Image (cartoon, helix red, strand yellow):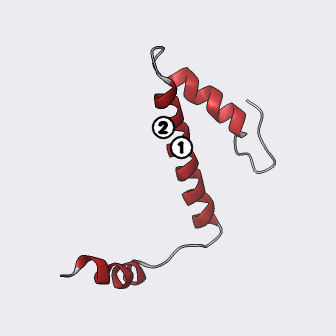
Amino acid sequence: MVMSDASVPLPKDEIRRLLDELPDDSTFSDIQYHIYVRQKIQRGLDDAAAGRTISQEEFDRRMAKWLEP
């Protein structure tokens, strides 16, 4: 597996690994879904590493207007 500068697997390598782990009878939709989920996870990890997060208290404050009747 080829690694990028930050020792993170390259996207093509990640997709190859993902395809190897999926059942042989996976549909295109199954594959797309797993790629989508992997992208979202990576985006969250990147945001956390870059400090683009909020505290639990801030989250609770923002969500209060949506969750309270």
How many tags in the picture?
2
Q: Is residue 48 left or right of residue 57?
A: right
Q: Which residue is mark 2?
A: 33
Q: Is residue 63 left or right of residue 35?
A: left
Residue 50 x/y as whole percent: 65, 69
Residue 8 x/y as whole percent: 70, 45
Q: Is residue 8 left or right of residue 41?
A: right
Farthest top residue?
24
Question: Helix or strand or loop: what does disc 1 sit on?
Answer: helix
Q: Which residue is mark 1?
A: 36
Other-residue count near label 1 (Cα within 10 Å), few / some / many at <14 / 14–19 / ≥20? few
Confirm or deny contact between disc 1 and disc 2 (CB under 8 A).
yes
- Seen in the picture, residue 17 relative to 62 is either above or below; the reply is above
Q: Three-letter amino acid code at disc 1?
A: Tyr
- Seen in the picture, residue 4 relative to 52 is either above or below; the reply is above
Most foreground residue, 60 or 29: 29
Q: Three-letter amino acid code at disc 2?
A: Tyr
The image quarter in which residue 65 lies: bottom left
Task: Residue at 53% x, 73% y: name it.
Answer: 53
- Seen in the picture, residue 44 relative to 67 is either above or below; the reply is above
Q: Which label number is shown at residue 2? A: none
- Seen in the picture, residue 30 relative to 60 is either above or below; the reply is above
Question: Helix or strand or loop: what does disc 2 sit on?
Answer: helix
Task: Residue at 77% x, 33% y: name it.
Answer: 2
